[in-house]
Image (tube, rainbow, N blue to C red):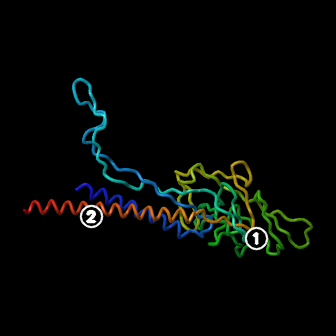
């Protein structure tokens, strides 16, 4: 019976939906995490009678036709890249991006990855690095004797050192943008990788047209809306339950058909 396989696709789709919701809720407190949203589309149809097909030699056509669907499938799981709230940490090496853009970091194999999680630190060599020790481009080094380190909204890094009457400029942080952020490949550890779908990164100075600004002493929080996720979870649970009832009903009908044949 076709209803069994159709309902099964519905249950599989809602299972995926619940898994995405679970991941969103699990990352509620993950720095700069972006909510994921599943999208579904209907499967191919069996055209028993195609709408608009001719029904007579006089030119009459079917106004509706008969098209029987085969169910549903998950077509995409995309990220909602809206801005997360900024949370004050008062940590010198916490940098939040207010607006569009990603920090570029160098991976151990020399390739570039990108992140919005600005919870950085200093390496033993004084370089600004991620929590996993990956160097934040363009590789700004902070002197060991620096008294204070400041980063303005345009990403200029300065340090006050003993004996100097004015702050010393250490370097300039940059941000990267992509034509299609949704096409980035998530690597985990708050890192993303460029793909053909995302397009090539476009570097720019924070505060320039189309680029966000840097907020030192702040971190961007997750943009997960807990109330919305719980509502979606209840909806997915009910949809799964209804599809399971279709399986039960189809099974009962098959059982009745089989018993009739035995009689």
**Residue 35 horizontal/vertical position (percent):** 55, 61
Q: Nearer the viewer, residue 21 or 34?
A: 21
Q: Which callout, 1 or 2, points to the residue nearer the camera?
A: 2
- The quarter of the picture where the C terminus appears is bottom left
Q: CA distance from mark 1 to mark 2?
A: 60 Å
Q: Nearer the viewer, residue 127 or 249?
A: 249
Residue 22 placement, left or right of 170 = left
* Residue 249 found in image quarter: bottom left
Q: Nearer the viewer, residue 44 or 57?
A: 57
Mark sitting earlier along the chain (1/2): 1
- The quarter of the picture where the N terminus appears is bottom left
Element class at badge 2 = helix
**Residue 197 horizontal/vertical position (percent):** 52, 51
* Residue 108 found in image quarter: bottom right
Residue 243 placement, left or right of 169 = left
Mark 1 neighbour class, 10 Å CA radius: few under 14, some 14 to 19, many 20 or more? some
Residue 174 placement, left or right of 63 = right
CB contact under 8 Å: marks 1 and 2: no
Residue placed under numbered mark 2 in the picture: 248
**Residue 187 horizontal/vertical position (percent):** 53, 64
Q: Nearer the viewer, residue 241 or 52?
A: 241
Residue placed under numbered mark 1 in the picture: 92
* Residue 248 found in image quarter: bottom left
| Residue under the point 53% across and 65% down | 24
| Residue under the point 59% across and 56% down | 81
Mark 2 neighbour class, 10 Å CA radius: few under 14, some 14 to 19, many 20 or more? some
Q: Which mark is residue 171?
A: none
**Residue 113 horizontal/vertical position (percent):** 60, 61
Which residue is situated farthest in the left direction here? 263
| Residue under the point 59% across and 61% down | 111
Element class at badge 1 = loop
């Amino acid at each position: 019976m076709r209803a069994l396989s159709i309902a099964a696709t519905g249950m599989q789709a809602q299972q995926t939906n619940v898994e995405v919701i679970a991941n969103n809720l699990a990352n509620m407190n993950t720095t700069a995490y972006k909510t994921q949203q599943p999208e579904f589309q209907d499967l191919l149809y069996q055209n028993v009678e195609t709408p608009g097909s001719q029904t007579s030699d006089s030119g009459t056509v079917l106004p509706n036709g008969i098209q029987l669907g085969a169910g549903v499938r998950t077509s995409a799981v995309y990220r909602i890249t809206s801005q997360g709230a900024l949370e004050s940490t008062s940590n010198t090496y916490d940098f939040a991006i207010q607006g569009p853009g990603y920090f570029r970091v160098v991976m151990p194999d020399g390739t570039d990855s990108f992140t919005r999680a600005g919870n950085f630190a200093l390496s033993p060599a004084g370089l600004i690095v991620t929590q996993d020790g990956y160097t934040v481009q363009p590789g700004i080094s902070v002197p060991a004797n620096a008294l204070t380190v400041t980063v303005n909204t345009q990403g200029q890094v300065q340090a006050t050192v003993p004996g100097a009457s004015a702050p010393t400029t250490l370097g300039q942080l940059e941000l990267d943008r992509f034509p299609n952020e949704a096409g980035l490949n998530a690597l985990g550890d708050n890192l993303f990788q460029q793909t053909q779908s995302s397009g090539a990164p476009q570097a720019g100075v924070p505060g320039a047209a189309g680029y966000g600004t840097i907020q030192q002493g702040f971190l961007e929080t997750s943009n997960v809306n807990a109330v919305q996720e719980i509502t979606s979870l209840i909806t997915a649970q009910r949809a799964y339950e209804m599809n399971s009832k279709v399986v039960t009903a189809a099974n009962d009908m098959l059982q009745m058909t089989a018993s009739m044949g035995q009689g």
